[in-house]
Image: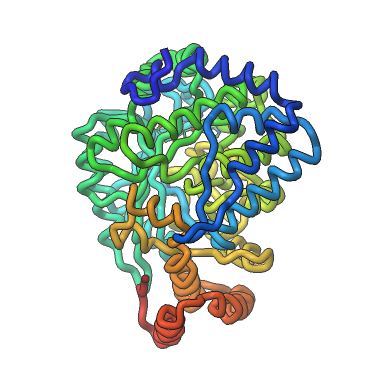
Amino acid sequence: MYDIKSLKAEEFINNEEILDTLAYAEENKHNRELIEQILNKAAPKKTGRGVECAGLSHREASVLLACDIPELNEKMYSLASEIKEAFYGNRIVMFAPLYLSNYCVNQCVYCPYHMQNKEIPRKKLTQEEVRNEVIALQDMGHKRLAIESGEDPVNNPIDYILECINTIYSIKHKNGAIRRVNVNIAATTVENYRKLHDAGIGTYILFQETYHKESYEKLHPAGPKHNYAYHTEAMDRAMEGGIDDVGLGVLFGLDMYKYEFAGLLMHAEHLEAVHGVGPHTISVPRVKRASDIDPNVFDNSIDDDIFAKIIACIRIAVPYTGMIISTRENEECRDRVLGLGISQISGGSRTSVGGYAGYTSEERPHDTEQFDVSDQRSLDDVVKWLIDTGYIPSFCTACYREGRTGDRFMSLCKVGQIQNCCHPNALMTLQEYLEDYASPETKAVGEALIAREINKVTNPKVFERAVKNLKDIKNGKRDFRF
Ligand code: SAM
């Protein structure tokens, strides 16, 4: 039976409830009156405290996703952009993945790290190699990483992950620093989540891959990841272990997208109902070609139009949740979805173990790669492209470092207050990037952007401090934040 507050996977991600939701969405996909009502409910409203959005239930959002009336779909896209603008402005937070180890004891049929893949060389970074990778990432300008690892209790035990996190935070090369380490490792115990929390991680990210239990079990035929309940209940354990920023995601292409969409929103609703705070981020990866993996064998792949619609509907349903897109997607696709709700993107990424140090921005090692990277531009190219298309690339990590995580972040974000500090923080961290890492062309367009955007800071005190900080950054000082 469906029970949003249950701690049992099959009750809070309840198959019957998803099937009923899909049937309801199908019945109402031409119900203009209902769709208009849902769109009105989701629209931003001005209140005494700022701008607020009601969000949508998984049922309501599923009706929007099913709707195929062109003009109502256009309304959805406009609403998604409006919501994005209200809570995230034109800022896009930058990050890079750092692959620590591709040793893995699982058999995920879509992942090249699966245990039976004999084609792929296995590699695990030493602390010296972690150090070199981090220096290479700092030299590109990154301040925020997502560490990635296969699951292998012998080769990559939790102590290895903790040691790597410690190494990453300890490296201060020139003006560089990694200020936030997000972690994407397999589901683990409350005790291990507590250790990750104590190590000062940012977001704990774990993709559900698919919410469909039967498919999940077929796609993960053996290994610890086979256990659907253990995997699906991981975020509850992470929160019990003290981690209050968690990141959800499904791997689109594995099962029916409408099913995944309803499951994803039910998971978000469950976290909010049980822990008082929804997911900090949602990722939307699609299956890609990789060593021993042909994406065409998965017959639920979605095209760019459906992908864009999913992103718009997630933005409308969970207006305060960050949304992440990786370099699995190409420039054209990323361009399209940025305006529909994406708030974080990776840039200059390598998905191989040891892919950064010792390579130029044109060279990329493929031997240990997790998947083909579609957007192969350097970080500087991505930063310039964002600026040219009207976005502010942000290297900000302030919320987490000021303790604005979990419900503290959400309650500020919910009344649009987060923008009072995010906007100047984005500009100050971009200024740091321009001073230390940008090409002359990027620096020129970036300076012009900052000069324009600083005038959007309306609070006179914040404006005055931000202008002074920007000047100090040009004079060599670093790491200011509101
Ligand atoms: N090993 C950890 C786990 O099992 O959750 C997480 C790290 S894994 C490197 C990160 C994610 O990559 C997986 O959760 C999966 O969704 C995604 N992934 C795996 N194979 C992929 C492929 N062929 N194309 C795109 N993404 C893939």
Place of residue 287 in the rendered image (x, y in percent of width and height, measured from the top left): 59, 31
Place of residue 13 in the rendered image (x, y in percent of width and height, measured from the top left): 44, 21
Instruction: Determine whether, in the image, residue 410 is placed left or right of residue 318.
Output: left
Residue at 57%, 20% (x, y): give it: 21
Residue at 45%, 44% (x, y): give it: 281
Q: Quadrant of the N terminus?
A: top left
Instruction: Determine whether, in the image, residue 207 is placed left or right of residue 165.
Output: right
- Give the camera-side residue of 154 and 109: 109
- Give the camera-side residue of 120 and 250: 250
Place of residue 122 in the rendered image (x, y in percent of width and height, measured from the top left): 40, 34
Place of residue 460 in the rendered image (x, y in percent of width and height, measured from the top left): 45, 82
Residue 278, by quadrant, is top left
| Any part of residue 20 in sight | yes
Task: Please say which color scheme the image uses.
Answer: rainbow
Q: Is residue 397 above or below residue 207?
A: below
Residue at 56%, 37% (x, y): give it: 285
Residue at 43%, 43% (x, y): give it: 353
In this view, the residue farthest toward the right is: 70
| Any part of residue 119 in sight | no
Instruction: Determine whether, in the image, residue 134 is placed left or right of residue 441.
Output: left
Q: Quadrant of the C terminus?
A: bottom left
- Give the camera-side residue of 272 and 441: 272
